[in-house]
Image: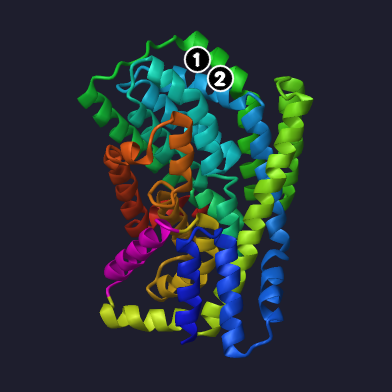
Amino acid sequence: MELWILFGSFTVLLLIGTPVAFCLGVSSFATVLYMGLPPIVVFQRLNSGISVFALMAIPFFIYAGEIMVRGDIARRLVALAGAMVGHLRGGLGQVNITASVLFGGISGSAAADASAIGGLMIPQMEKRGYDTDYAVNVTVVSSIIALMLPPSHNLIIYSISAGGRISIADLFTAGIIPGLLLALSLMVAAWYVARKRGYPTEPFPGLQMLGILFASAVPGLILVAIIFGGVRSGVFTASESSCIAVVYALAVTLVAYRSLSWGAFVETTLNAVRTTAMVLLVIGSAAAFGWLLAFLRVPAALVDGLQSVSDNPIVILLLINLCLLLLGTFMDMSPLIVITTPIFLPVAAAFGVDPVQFGIILILNLGIGLCTPPVGAVLFVGCAVGRIHIGQAVRTIWPFYLAAFVTLLFVTYVPALSLWLPSLFH
């Protein structure tokens, strides 16, 4: 009965439009009351869920990303991407994907990527004769590349949700090859659609212009080296690197680019505070919800249930992916990471999946959920920027979904894609 109350109240609250943090908190509170436990347990679990030192990295990485979004770095990266791949079939579509790779290594946020790159690229693509649905679809799905590249704060949340036993440096490293593989798959999909619709290519500006644009973007790109190199080498922790990232981002936008006005700085700070507050409230509420799941032995029951279905790891991983894809269609990413990690990680580990590899599978899977209706946050952002209805975008997005699903299958069943690069640093 406890599980009926927990999941039933959560589902009802979600269906009536209650913010997900309150859905998690209220359903946990109602279940605790029914079980006769002290109600303060919910608040204790919420507090312990966010009282983790490693979470200090999240607000600073969010802040650094906000500064870079408003500090002219996105425009410079788009220009560099245009010079690199604009001459390929699909022109600006390929530029959009490449810019997401470059910007994702700075922002670590899919929503920030869709907003910044989409705001620059979608109007340009429309002017050059690209259909709006194509521009939005490319922007939306390519934005999830940012989730797998450092400094993805979702990888940090996964590490903490797994009990803090998984190295953040290993996760940052493990996501690089799958992120690039996703970009390559999406470029093939963009080429396919562009070829069918007869979209143009852009002229190659020459090596000299490519060098100039690269030099212009270097100050921003160095941030990637600082974050990844520092954490991977052990010079500083993820929390320390996030603080350094903010200082460096401010230096680049104020001194090198001189593009951050006082008004933009204030707006950037307020946006970072709001985003951080929302993320941490969701994490805390999800921690209380996840504790109840563990208390009610849901993970153990799930392991037994899946083992009764099959003892084949291929089948079990497929079932886990299907469950996560379904959950991702109606819940946001951060709470799902906190809730599903303690449930599915033991199952995956029981079938021989490395926790680092499972982290990349989880992040990519839930990232796809951000692009799917009815609760696809990044899909909403892309459609808002492109000013089209969600239905119009979803009708033609299937080639990009297919590319993402194929990448997910490769990451799931080829462990070396996630584990080879981290192994080089051990």
Q: Determine whether the residue tagged by mark 2 lies in a helix, strand or loop.
A: helix
Q: Quadrant of the C terminus?
A: bottom right
Asked if 143 appears above or below 133 in the picture, the reply is: below
Taking the view exactly as shown, the residue that stands out farthest to the right is: 262
User: Looking at the picture, which amino acid does disc 2 mark?
Assistant: Phe
Q: Residue at x 42, y 25 (%)?
A: 95
Say how the picture is coloured.
Answer: rainbow
- Residue 314 location in percent, x, y? 28, 67
Asked if 335 appears above or below 29 in the picture, the reply is: above
Which residue carries the number 2 mark? Answer: 214
| Residue 340 seen in the current view | no
State which region is magenta.
312-330
Asked if the magenta segment contains residue 329, the reply would be yes
| Residue 327 seen in the current view | yes
Q: Determine whether the residue tagged by mark 1 lies in a helix, strand or loop.
A: helix
Asked if the magenta segment contains residue 364, the reply would be no
Q: Disc 1 vs disc 2: Cβ atoms closer than 8 Å?
A: yes
Taking the view exactly as shown, the residue that stands out farthest to the bottom is: 36
Horizontal side, residue 369 vs residue 13: left or right = left
SS assignment for the magenta stretch, majority: helix
- Residue 362 location in percent, x, y? 45, 59
User: Looking at the picture, which amino acid does disc 1 mark?
Assistant: Leu
- Residue 307 location in percent, x, y? 32, 80
Decide: few, some or many residues near mark 2? Use Cα within 10 Å; few <14, some 14-19, many ≥20: some
- Residue 270 location in percent, x, y? 73, 41
Q: Residue at x 28, y 19 (%)?
A: 199
Residue nearest the viewer, comparing 57 with 354: 57
Which residue carries the number 1 mark? Answer: 210
